Image (cartoon, helix red, strand yellow):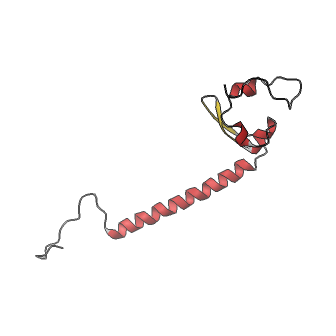
Amino acid sequence: MRKNGAVSPPSAGKLPRSRTRLKVRERKRAKEVLKESEIEYRRLVDNSLTGISITQNHLLKFCNQRFAEIFSYSRPEEMIGISLRYFASASTPNPTAKPSIDPRE
């Protein structure tokens, strides 16, 4: 309201305070739901009996514990950045023996 008593129109692009508070609450709740979803997804991947991996440009970016075990690694972190060619060339008589090529190529 203006000094002379006239009602001024709401500013373009601005929400009234009650709407702004509602938007903030909605955004906060959406973040909470996303976090819960990420935790559930992580639990599912970590406890999977199947090896799960994510690659980008033929390099391993993520894998779960089971994937690491399949290739005789003790921890998934040891495998990050290794080329898929390294795993494809694993044609040795001993299934636990690792190929003798440089895994980072």
Q: Which residue is rendered at x = 17% and y = 71% of the image?
A: 7
**Picture coordinates of residue 100, whole percent (x, y):** 79, 24
Q: Is residue 83 above or below residue 38?
A: above
**Picture coordinates of residue 57, whole percent (x, y):** 60, 29
Out of 91 and 101, give the one closest to the viewer.
Answer: 101
Q: Name which quarter of the figure residue 75 lies in.
A: top right
On screen, residue 41 versus residue 65, left or right, reads: left
On screen, residue 58 versus residue 98, left or right, reads: left
**Picture coordinates of residue 80, whole percent (x, y):** 67, 37
Whether residue 59 appears in this view of the structure is: yes
Q: Is residue 45 above or below residue 83?
A: below
Q: Is residue 26 above or below residue 75?
A: below
For the C terminus, give its image quadrant. Answer: top right
Q: Of all residues shown, which one is farthest toward the right?
A: 94
Q: Which residue is rendered at x = 89% and y = 24% of the image?
A: 93
Q: Is residue 22 above or below residue 78?
A: below
Q: Which residue is rendered at x = 68% and y = 31% of the image?
A: 82
Q: Name which quarter of the figure residue 72 lies in.
A: top right
Out of 63 and 11, give the one closest to the viewer.
Answer: 63
On screen, residue 58 versus residue 70, left or right, reads: left
Q: How many marks?
A: 0
**Picture coordinates of residue 1, whole percent (x, y):** 18, 73
Whether residue 50 appears in this view of the structure is: no
